[in-house]
Image (cartoon, rainbow, N blue to C red):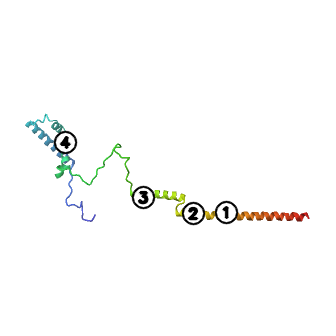
Amino acid sequence: MPKGRKGGHKGRARQYTSPEEIDAQLQAEKQKAREEEEQNEEVGDGAAGDPKKEKKSLDSDESDEDDDDYQQKRKGVEGLIDIENPNRIGQTTKKVTQLDLDGPKELSRREREEIEKQKAKERYMKMHLAGKTEQAKADLARLAIIRKQREEAARKKEEERKAKDDATVSGKRMQSLSLNK
């Protein structure tokens, strides 16, 4: 706070009421209410027969405060017209019987796209397994080439093994012939 300033930034100095002053004001209000009540009884407006006025006489200080609060809350045009914000939407709660569970549910754009993506992927996998996609055809061709290469390699190994067996058998015969001599 800058130097030279004391108190608030508004113009006036604040005034505080002491508890004694508050009590005095309440006493004056009660006295006024009693005087009005006595005047009503003298005139004979039928205050004795009216239950609302009897209740007011019993709780005069409380009802006066309630009336003042009500008047303070509804000043000016507010007392004549109920003003409500037309843009404000009040929350309405639905009962379980009113809920429409069988009706079609509106999906968001992201949910729809996700479902379409999953369906497209499933269709592709079915076609791929059936061998109708380009990738499946390429895979099957590659597998056929690999099968042929493996069959040829297995045939060559078998021929080499037979050649070795023949060579070892013929070599053993020669040894046995040479030993027999």
- For marks 4 and 1, give the CA distance: 107 Å
Say which residue label 3 marks: 113
Residue 80: image x %, image y %?
A: 16, 49
Left or right of 100: which side holds 143?
right
Residue 92: image x %, image y %?
A: 30, 47
N-terminal of the two: label 1 or label 2? 2
- Name the residue: 89% across, 64% down: 179
Decide: few, some or many residues near mark 4? Use Cα within 10 Å; few <14, some 14-19, many ≥20: some
Say which residue label 1 marks: 151
Q: Quadrant of the C terminus?
A: bottom right
Decide: few, some or many residues near mark 1? Use Cα within 10 Å; few <14, some 14-19, many ≥20: few
Q: Which residue type does callout 3 highlight?
A: Glu
Please give the label number shown on residue 139. 2
Count numbered badges in the picture: 4
- For marks 3 and 2, give the CA distance: 30 Å
Taking depth in this image into account, of 63 and 71 the one nearest to the observer is 71
Residue 6: image x %, image y %?
A: 24, 61
Residue 110, quarter of picture:
bottom left
Which of the two discs, 2 and 4, sits closer to the camera? 2
Q: Quadrant of the N terminus?
A: bottom left
